[in-house]
Amino acid sequence: MGRGSLIAVIAVLLLFSCEEGYMTDCRECYPEYPLQSTLNILLWNPDIAIQNARVTLYEGTIEDSLVIQYYSFDMVSSSLTFDAILYKDYSATLEFNFEGKKYVTTGAARPKVRYDETSCDESCYYVYDNVIDLRLRYH
């Protein structure tokens, strides 16, 4: 292996060996390891008036068709919560009518736990990847 190839291999290893940066919300930190999580499902912005909203929450992927729960909305609500199991895949769809058109948005999450020793006053466990964002971004 030539010198140039060795430098290229080392550069690639260094580039892909770093973890992604993250921010810990210390208000959401727990001193003990959490056994479950709250799954937050973001539905829509309050300035959009939608009709006939229905959320379907699935265990696993949508294609697995393992429906956990249906939610129907007559009143405007911007989010839902669901008691979720850590390291389990969840997905959801939001079906609604807006300005005479039918929309379906999808999203997925897998709640995980990270141990953070430095970001907060005390070491703690932090739940992340527990948000499914079903908001309509463009219309």
Image (cartoon, grey):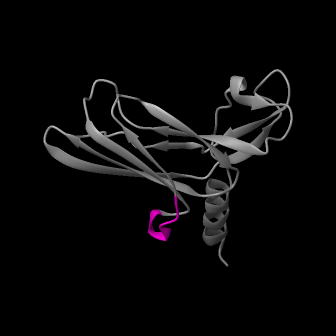
As drawn, the residue found furthest toward the bottom would be 1
Residue 120 part of the magenta segment:
no
Picture quadrant of residue 62: bottom left
Q: Which residues lie in the magenta part?
A: 62-67
Residue shown at 79% from the left, 45% from the top:
35
Query: Could you tell whether 36 is left or right of 136 in the image?
Result: right
Residue shown at 30% from the left, 51% from the top:
104
Residue shown at 83% from the left, 33% from the top:
117
- Count of picture labels: 0
Residue shown at 31% from the left, 39% from the top:
137
Q: Position of residue 25 (x, y in %)?
A: 67, 27
Q: In which quadrant is the C terminus drawn?
A: top left
Q: Position of residue 1 (x, y in %)?
A: 67, 79
Q: Is residue 104 above or below residue 128?
A: below
Nearest to the observer: residue 71 or residue 80: 71
Query: Could you tell whether 31 is left or right of 112 in the image?
Result: right
Q: Is residue 7 above or below residue 101?
A: below
Query: Could you tell whether 12 is left or right of 107 in the image?
Result: right
Nearest to the observer: residue 77 or residue 113: 77
Query: Could you tell whether 33 is left or right of 76 in the image?
Result: right
Q: Position of residue 136 (x, y in %)?
A: 31, 40
